[in-house]
Image (cartoon, grey):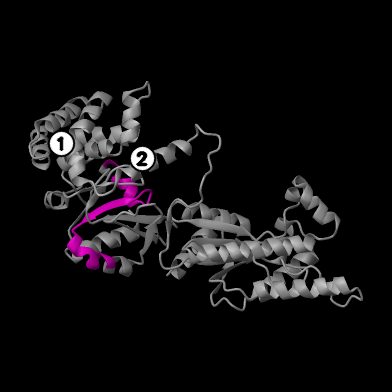
Amino acid sequence: MLARIIEFFNLLDKKGITYCQWKSNERLGSFLNGESDLDLLFYSSDQDKIEEIFSKIGAKKFEILRFSKYKNITDYLQVDEKTGKIIHYHVYFSLELGEPNVKQYLIEWSDEILLNRIKHEQYNVWIPSHEHELVLLILREVLRIPYLKMFIIKNSYFKLNFSNKMIGEFNWLKKRVDKKKFISTVNKLFSEKKNITDAFEYIFENSFSFKKISELFDNLESFKQENKIKNSFYSHYNFIKLIFTSKLFLFKKSSDFKNRINPRKGLLVAVIGSDGAGKSTLIQNLKKEFGKKINVKNFYFGSPKSEKISIFPWLKIITFFGLKPFLNLFLKKINLRKAINLRNKGLLILCDRFPQSKYEKLLDGPRLSTDNKSNNFLKKWASNYEKKEFEKIFNSKIDLVIKLKVDENLSSSRGKLPIDLAKKKTQAIENLIFPNCNKHYELNAISNSSERIKIQTMNIIWKNID
């Protein structure tokens, strides 16, 4: 169990706050090690106390990006300092269930579940009684099925497949459930409606089958109507959207923005260093880790890649006429504008390199500096214009600069640079300070592994997220 998670549960017990980890407890061990979300149910009256606890442990609230946000579910995230794992506390103050990304039903069972909670057999964590958890598992599976999907399956040769993960949960719970208590729980929760009780009992005895799930789907119609909090439009829209973004369609367009944003403000991070410092590797690692839970966008601020120039004919023309420095400047300005815009929308922005104007023809700086004293009016104008624009970029507001430090020998060998050039670049990095950034961090990329650098940087970024 991660130390931060232990601290969190200890604080809940110390403050006398009632909770339970309400689903998928067959895999509780992996949740406690930060491998997946913790789904925690609380009394709504404890919201202020819980927010205070999250603030104390350094967890931060993020908002999910959906066309209809959840009313009673809040996301808190936290970076575990030692491992770099992102802990996701999925906090429920009422049970919102339903289809993925929609959750159109509000089930008022919180009191019943919390009053009957038990301690997990292996871990010192509160969970629902096994009977309640099994009822919730079956109900969740039924409510996850879109109406249009059920209609198509009933009237076609398509099948409804049940995941191995879900079947594993069912079997784990069934071994621990008392049948009489299970039937009694179903009767209590569904007001002794015999058709519903019979369907739950059949599933308990015989596991999941499409026939019984379909039957239960129909029998729950009045229950669904009583507990519906969102219009059916959301369900139909989401299902159709999923179809058109599935692998069945070749025009699938994946979105980078499918997780969570910081509702307060995003963060713009520039990673700089000499050749061979591991900038691109770090950016990739950070995007992979943070991208599991929040929206991350990375921008490359180096020179246009030669392989891209060789692909597009218009880029070849630009290069032929000696206009590549203007293309370089144009792309940097476009990327910076996009980066700032997305940062202001709550995203984490990772910049691989960042333009500066202090060192010319070095470290992504101006390229036309030698022309500023030329007798040719156009060359002189171009040089002065480029210098001026680079100074504007250099003075842009950056939230955080991560400087990866290597010595000239390592930079030369890793970056395949002449030793003189490597020395020049490492010295320039040593002295480079961005004027409109208050937070510069230096990390030793010589003795630290890429994994260690990643964890250090994740902690730095997390510390600076509001």
The residue under label 1 is which amino acid type?
Val
State the residue lying farthest toward the top.
Answer: 157
Tell me: 390 left or right of 237. Answer: right
Residue sitting at x 17%, y 26%:
202
> Badge 2 is on which residue?
236
Above or below for 209 versus 133: above
The crowding category of the residue bearing disc 2, from other C-alpha atoms within 10 Å (few below 14, some 14 to 19, many at least 20), is some
Question: Which residue is tagged 1?
Answer: 177
Which element carries disc 1, helix, strand or loop? loop
| Amino acid marked by disc 2 | His
Q: Nearer the viewer, residue 107 or 176?
A: 107
User: Does residue 101 sit above or below 422 in this rendering?
Assistant: above
Q: Mark 1 or 2 closer to N-term? A: 1
Q: Nearer the viewer, residue 138 or 285?
A: 138
Q: Can residue 160 be spotted in the picture?
A: no
Residue sitting at x 51%, y 48%: 255
Q: Residue at x 81, y 61 (%)?
A: 323
Residues in magenta?
Answer: 26-51
